Image (cartoon, grey):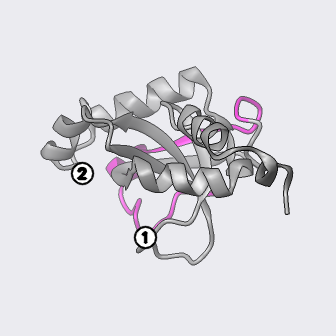
Amino acid sequence: MSLGDFFPDDLKNQFAKRNIDLGSAILIKIPDFTVNYDKYIIVVAKDNAEEDIAYVVINSEANPNVAYNSYLKSLHLKIDKANNPFLEKDSFVDCSKVREFSIDTVVEFLKKNPERAVGNVSSSDLKSIHITITTATTIEPYIKKKYGF
């Protein structure tokens, strides 16, 4: 049992919604992902109806199976621990693909696991991530349109 278990549901709900904002970093299990452990994600956008969020994944290194040429490597942005204290070490953000979660799924997850809202990426890193996503040819145009990239 944690301290959060003693808070009323409306406060837990407000906390969860506050922590789903642009640049928020969350440690979460990603469905249909190639690894079976939780990953850090960064919320990069919400759709206009605020039903879904777009996110990118943080990896400890640029995966050579994904970043197998110079263009794909350029879509893996290095972020450092000094500016992002929730990280254990300098890492890479995979901007070659934008993934989606429903906001309700993330709210429910954070209500049960508030400690998994680990902080925010630095504003300069978030800006670089947005620019990279906007120019990435690997992301489907309908996803870019849906999230305003």
Q: Which picture quadrant has residue 83?
A: top right
Q: Which residues are magenta?
A: 60-84
Residue at x 52%, y 43% (from the top left corner): 42
- Is 15 magenta? The answer is no
Please identify the dominant SS of the magenta region.
Answer: loop
* Residue at the disc numbered 2: 138
Q: Is residue 105 left or right of residue 41?
A: left
2 or 1: mark nearer the eye: 2
Rendered location of residue 149, percent (x, y): 25, 31
What type is the residue that disc 2 sits on? Thr
Q: The residue under label 1 is which amino acid type?
A: Asn
- Judge from the rendering whether residue 119 lies leftward or rightward of residue 124; answer left or right: right
Q: Going 64% across and 48% down the picture, which residue do you hit? A: 91
On screen, residue 129 versus residue 120, left or right, reads: left
Secondary structure type for disc 1: loop
Q: Is residue 49 left or right of residue 119?
A: left
Work out whether residue 106 or residue 77 is closer to the camera in this orientation and state it: 106
Q: Tag 2's secondary structure?
A: loop
Above or below residue 64? Residue 10 is above
Res 142 label? none
Nearer-N-terminus badge (2/1): 1
What residue occupies the far left of the structure in this picture? 142
Give the residue at x 41% y 44%: 74
What's the mark number on residue 65?
1
Give how far across and how far down residue 122 sits, in percent.
62, 26
Q: Position of residue 134 (x, y in %)?
A: 28, 32
